[in-house]
Image: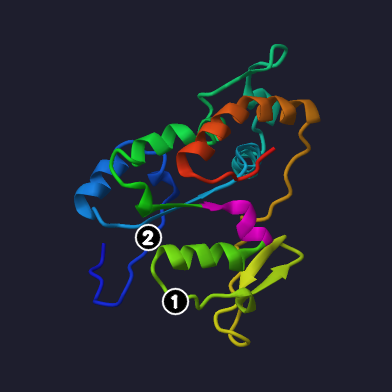
Amino acid sequence: MPTSLEGQITMEKTPSYFITREAAPRLRAMAPSVRLLVVVRDPVTRAVSDYTQSASKRPSSSSFEDMAFLNASTGLVDTAWPAIRIGVYARFVEWWTPRHFPKEQVLFISGEELVRDPAAEMARVQDFLGLKRIVSDKHFYFNETKGFPCLKKSEGSGNPHCLGKTKGRAHPEISPATIQRLRDFYRPFNAKFYQMVGRNFGWP
């Protein structure tokens, strides 16, 4: 990591950190006072999005249903499939807090709220990092084509930064029965996750 000067904050992003068991103790040894931001979203939507991204690279992929279930007739969920496994957030929280980091150093951010109300969610981030609230609703506009908000580099000027081409893909049609089965599967894990992090994300 580059050295930060006084008054600077160095940030780094790697999604795999949260789901890699070795990451927490290594990070603790390197920077025990680090502040951690974890963006989560409805695990069912996340699984479908994960599948959509993978299928775009491998058009011959099996259907989502074939990947999600060990047995389609019984509805037994394949918890070893990464698209499903990663959404069991409570499992990974146990690797990070409070074992290696106190809860006060970890902020869980709602992926849904980043889309619905990015300014409010960013206000939480700025408060958590001890920063003056500079980023506000004046810095965002909703891109109807992408279905996501874009960030203006400076209030009223500059080219906006929008998510790249790999974001905002149309998801495949998934049967309501499949969605319901996955919601039933995740519900107890979501409840445990809400309790662990002290926030109800309101997933169905």
Q: Residue at x 33, y 70 (%)?
A: 9
Q: Residue at x 61, y 64 (%)?
A: 118
Q: Residue at x 69, y 52 (%)?
A: 169
Determine the CA span between mark 2 and mark 1. Answer: 20 Å
- The image position of residue 189, as x and y in percent, is 54, 30
Name of the residue lying farthest toward the left: 29
Name of the residue lying farthest toward the top: 74
2 or 1: tag closer to the N-terminus: 2
Q: What residue is shown with label 1?
A: 132
Mark 2 vs 1: CB contact within 8 A: no
Left or right: 186 as drawn, with respect to 172: left
Residue 112 colored in magenta in the image: yes
Left or right: 155 as drawn, with respect to 178: left
Q: Under tag 1, what secondary structure?
A: loop
Q: What residue is shown with label 2?
A: 12
- The image position of residue 2, as x and y in percent, is 25, 67
Instruction: Give the crowd class for mark 2: few <14, some 14-19, many >=20 residues within 10 Å.
Output: few
**Along the line of sight, which residue is nearer the eye, 113 or 104?**
104
Marking on residue 50: none
Q: Amino acid type of disc 1?
A: Lys
Magenta residue span: 109-116
Q: Under tag 2, what secondary structure?
A: loop
Figure quadrant of residue 59: top right
